[in-house]
Amino acid sequence: MKRLLLALYGLVLLLLLIAASGCSNQDKASQTPGVITAKFATYEEVTVNATPAIKPYKVDRDLGNITNKDMFRLSPAATNLLIENGFVVVPNTYEKEFFSLYERNRYEPVPLFITTDSVLHNYHLFFDHLLRVVETEKLAPQLQELNKAMLSQSQKQCKDLKGTDWENAARRTAGFFAVAGKLLDPGAPVPLEVKSEVENELALIENHQGIAVSPLMNIGGSSDSGDLQQEDYSQYIPRGHYERTDLLKAYFKSMMWYGRMTFRVNNEDETKSAVLIALALNQGENRQMWDRIYATTNFFVGKSDDVSYEQFKELIDNIYGADAGLQTVVAGPEKWDAFLEAARELEPPSINSMPVIDVTSPSEREKESKGFRFMGQRFTLDASVFQRLLYPEVMVNSQGEMRVLPKGLDIPAAMGSEEAYDILQATGATDYRNYPENMAKMKAYIAGLSKETWNQNLYWNWLYTLMPLTWEKPAGYPSFMRNSAWERKDLNTYLGSWAELKHDTILYAKPVYAEAGGGGEIIDDRGYVEPNPDVYARLASLVKMNSSGLKARGLLNERDQESLARMETLVLALKTISEKELSNTPLTDEEYDLIRSYGGQLEHFWLEALRDEGIDHRSAIFDRPAALVADVATNPGGGQVLEEATGNVFEIYAVVPVDGKLRIAIGGVYSYYEFPWPLNDRLTDSRWHRMLNDGQVPQLPGWTETFIAQ
């Protein structure tokens, strides 16, 4: 009965996706996981009880109605924006982390403005920490065992198939697992029959210079000269937290290999290799080891949309009989054509992550990219949005230019932000044939997603948490939040947190290709929480889901569990304060004390999030600043990637109402960057940090000028 309900649910979502997007392969975006990828945790939504009732206010030109105007020194440009918008963001070059900005209150009491940015960044720190610990302590050792077992099975297949028309496919399979094994463990063995191809493949991975023909995948001349499979070897540059230890670097490369290399169904010999992998995975404990890795990473990021082991196993069972073995499949050539035909009828991936160049239509791209992956990179909603808004899904503009790299603003625009779309339109980013139509389809699809779909894993739920940042604030919210400048500040927050999400999941998420202290005088330093109760409610639910899911699988130690519980309590307290602020309910002394002590709490979480790396002192802020970078899309033809980054923590000054009077409060926000970069030089965090320190950074997006005082 459960399987029937799951099947019906998947069918309903498929029909919704087809209707909304016109792309039949998008059903993979939200199918409920099967038995092998069962859910880790359920999602319990926190309710919001807010009745906005703050009366509108304006800032006097001379700041005469600001009670603490002499507490801050702002430039004329910053003062003008403060008066005009009720808030202003000021860049700086010295704040490396959020907690250090908020801890000023220890030594120089000022009203603090707790921002959504700082809370979201706090979650990123712990998400990245938990993933890093799970990978180091659980997944990497499990992967090493799986590599050994699969290589052993593939070598046995090579021996059994020698002299048959499956021999070349068997050699490719053995080489495939030998490469993965060597990437994780340099001492791993390599079968003699594939030694040359494996060494050549490893050299390309080590040099990571860009797109080249794969020696291993094209082994034995199994492809026509025009059908040679290529790989983007720049993807093997360890990025995100994976550059921090040798083990994580090796794990990154091995998993990237499994996630990207494709056994194309339009190539018969590669399809034979995929069948051999599926048969080898059925042996011994192989499938269980594979599932422990895949199910865990599925909880963090999601499912793959490539042709999978489960799909191939189902075809093998249907055509050759249940649990058919190697000899049954090889001895049944009359059934092979039926298998090939059935495999080619499987749905193509919704997101293309292969360097397919010179395709002129989505159908041609799908034909070239459809194939089996051993542990494919995962479908994500934002990458799917990008795919629908790039060539050839959208055609050239009036200047004959192709849209080969997306814009970060495409994502909040698809989630319903009119301000994001207006910015895109004003800059010409929408002036491509089919862009407005495809964007409208994606908006309709996203608007119709159920909560169950949004809450299927941590990645999707992170996006769900950010969604309220795309909402226009209604009457009753503070005046500084009720203008277009604040809408853009919310977009900056959205994109800063989204850049952190892409950074933390860079290994698994499919990339898209276009183709308390102090003293002194008594000062009224009562602060304010940015009233975003919907964001805080969703974030509290996400934190709880994170904790319960990992705990259920024995992947969470007691100390991290306590930290997550403490984080959930903090976020819920901020939600309550937000609701009281909006309804003009006075805060308690304890709630004001929480705002005062916020910097110390952030420092605690920062230290806990870096504990696994041996960092136990705040001086390490210079080695582990908040700034990060992640490439999110690739233009193989132009040799470029799109980099998304955050830099130093910028200051925000907001005019807030406390006890019916206006005061300035200070907090921290993301600095956000977006820029193209050479494909063969994908940026790492350490490289980006050097660029920031040397002042070699691109300009901030032009649309931020309405709220950032340069």
Image (spheres, rainbow, N blue to C red):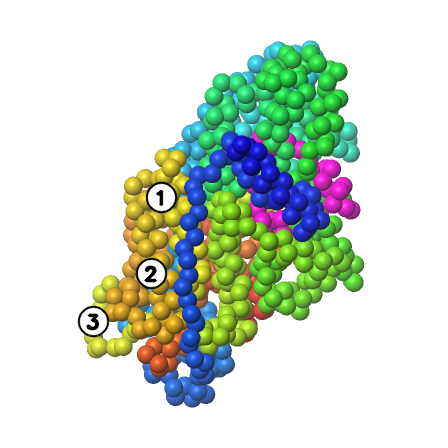
What is the number of the mark on residue 543?
A: none
Q: Does 364 appear in magenta?
A: yes
Q: Which SS class for mark 3?
A: loop
Asked if marks 3 and 2 touch (Cβ < 8 Å), the reply is: no
**Mark 2 or 1, which is nearer the eye?**
2
Q: Is residue 48 visible?
A: yes
Which residues lie in the magenta part? 360-386
Q: Which SS class for mark 1?
A: helix
**Chain-order first, disc 3 or disc 2:** 3
Kind of residue sitting beneath label 3: Gly
Name the residue: 53% across, 68% down: 472
Badge 3: residue crowd in 10 Å (few <14, some 14–19, many ≥20): few
Name the residue: 78% across, 46% down: 360
On the rendered structure, is 124 left or right of 337? left
| Vertical position of residue 625 compared to residue 523: above or below | above
Badge 2: residue crowd in 10 Å (few <14, some 14–19, many ≥20): some
Residue at which label 2 appears: 573
Looking at the picture, tell me which residue is in the foreground, 296 or 534: 534
Kind of residue sitting beneath label 2: Ala
Residue at which label 1 appears: 613
Determine which quarter of the picture holds residue 413.
bottom right
Q: Does 376 appear in magenta?
A: yes
**Chain-order first, disc 2 or disc 1:** 2
Kind of residue sitting beneath label 1: Glu
Looking at the picture, tell me which residue is in the foreground, 81 or 290: 290
On the rendered structure, is 37 left or right of 655? right
Residue at which label 3 appears: 519
| Vertical position of residue 308 compared to residue 81: above or below | above
Name the residue at the front extreme. 1
Badge 1: residue crowd in 10 Å (few <14, some 14–19, many ≥20): some
Instruction: Using the numbered discs, state the Cα–Cα distance from disc 2 to disc 1 in whole angstroms.
Output: 30 Å
